[in-house]
Amino acid sequence: PAPAPLSPDRLSALEASLRASGVLTEEASARLVYLDDVLVPELSVTRSEPGLGCYSSSVERLPAHLAEVFGYLPDGVTDDLPYSPSTSRARTPLSALSGPSHNVGPYNSQSAANNQQGTGSLAALNGLHCASVAVVDVSPAASSSSSSAPASDLGPVHVVRCYDSAGPGGASHPRTIVNVGDGASARVVQRVVDVRLPPPGVGPDDVGGSGASAAPSTRDRPRRSPSLHNGYTQVRVGAHSSVSHSFVDESGGAVEADVEGDADARRREEARRDYDDTLFETVSAHVAGEGGSYGAAVVDAGGRGRTRVCLEVHLMEEGGSAAVDGLVMSGGMQRKEMRTNIHHIAPGCTSRQGQRNLVGGRSAVAFKGRIRVEQSAQQTTSEQLARSLLLNEKSRVWCIPSLEIIADDVSCTHGATVSDLSEEELFYLRSRGLDRETSRNMQLYGFIDEVSRSVDPSILGTADGEGLRKRLGERLMRIIPRGERQVKGEFQSS
């Protein structure tokens, strides 16, 4: 049965909460808003016209070309790659690439398991339980249509997943499919946010905004069942087309500050309602057309106790390119993980990845970045760099970049750095009249701003006004250590 519509009070509260936090913007050419995995049509702007289809569909009603996409599982579980019908390449299964001496073999073999992200089973679980699919289907607009702008002129498409912070918890399995045809382009923004809705009969004036601004009131509410977000996003990029994809997680409220030195703060963090919640997000992108381009900006700034974001990009046709920027902000006693896999299959492709981790409190972050260049992917250019800042001696980070190169005509680099803030840069700023706290905050804002600039500008905003930049700054203030550091870790600049 169809879920009951929201009452007028709850709908008004939801709209007020999303507008207050800048989630509902007028720049979006289309928008899908879900509350607890149920579409809210009153706040959504669907499109069904030449050049752009943006709608929510049941699994059974998906068009044939998208139903085929829906059945694909990552991590090599589905062995047949989605080659374009017009491809001139041999349709080699994933397990046979670079064979017979260097192929990974079936997905359940040991050699394949060593390189997997652990997303195959989660994606299968998503396919079993997802209630609806958010569809973004873009192609060049028909030239005879005067009512539609060309696909290249379309504004961003927003897919917003909202969770009621006062809800009962439980599991959610959202699915998103982005299909961009030959010669088209798209900007897609995915957001995961909290909202605070009143129970039935309570007016919208009794609620606040989403994200960090909504977090404090959730601390005094009764404990509820832990929640699980198990999302799966699939992206297909056609020939000479481009996709700009932003994924931003701001759910889970705000972490407690000063847990590294305050036992009471640690107890409050462990008692926080969102501390037991988990977020898994799997993004699987296939650049399946010649000259296709995929750009991703992934920001994990949420307050759930455990999160893991996994992204894989397959460059399947000559001239394809990928650019991936990631930011993880962790504090309190969180455990976060970012896993990436950039897979070069065709020759003449390029990829670039920049990862930034900002780790404070007693939290721990792990980054595992893998680049595999198949024997067929000659003249590949690829680079990867992970930079991490540890804000105190109680936080932990693991960076594991890896290269697996079978081809012999490539230019590939990878690296990782783990450090504290530069004392020389702090000295420079303080010599210009700034105090130590202001100097430190300026460095940290600069560190995260380099990645945030790659996020779609429709949600970025400014540090002083509404938008993602401001909220990232607010979350940053909750993980920055207070006062001077008394103990220097071995990673700290001397």
Image: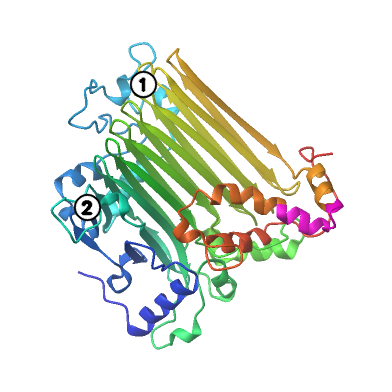
Which residue is at a point 68% across and 57% down the rendered structure image?
479
Q: Pick the residue in front: 186 or 58.
A: 186
Residue 478 visible in rendering: no
Mark 1 is surrounded, within 10 Å at the Cα level, by few (under 14), some (14 to 19) or many (20 or more) other residues, namely many
Which residue is at a point 51% across and 34% down the rendered structure image?
369
Disc 1 element: loop
Report the residue marked by disc 1.
347
Residue 431 part of the magenta-drawn span: yes
Report the residue marked by disc 2.
51
Q: Amino acid under label 1?
A: Pro
Disc 2 element: loop
Which residue is at a point 77% across and 54% down the rendered structure image?
439
Q: Pick the residue in front: 408 or 119.
A: 408
Q: What's drawn in magenta, residue-wise?
A: 430-442
Mark 2 is surrounded, within 10 Å at the Cα level, by few (under 14), some (14 to 19) or many (20 or more) other residues, namely many
Image quadrant for the N terminus?
bottom left
Q: Pick the residue in front: 184 or 378.
A: 184
Residue 358 part of the magenta-drawn span: no
Left or right for 108, reference 2: right
Estimate the spatial distance between the alpha carbons at disc 2 and disc 1, rounded to whole Å: 30 Å
x, y percent for residue 109: 37, 24
Which residue is at a point 31% across and 27% down the rendered structure image?
317
Q: Amino acid under label 2?
A: Gly
Quick check: 341 above or below 66?
A: above
Left or right for 218, reference 476: left
x, y percent for residue 112: 40, 25
Q: Pick the residue in front: 407 or 330.
A: 407
Image quadrant for the C terminus?
top right
Quick check: 343 above or below 96?
A: below
Left or right for 243, reference 471: left
Q: Earlier in the sequence, mark 2 or mark 1?
A: 2
Asked which quadrant contains residue 9, the reply is bottom left
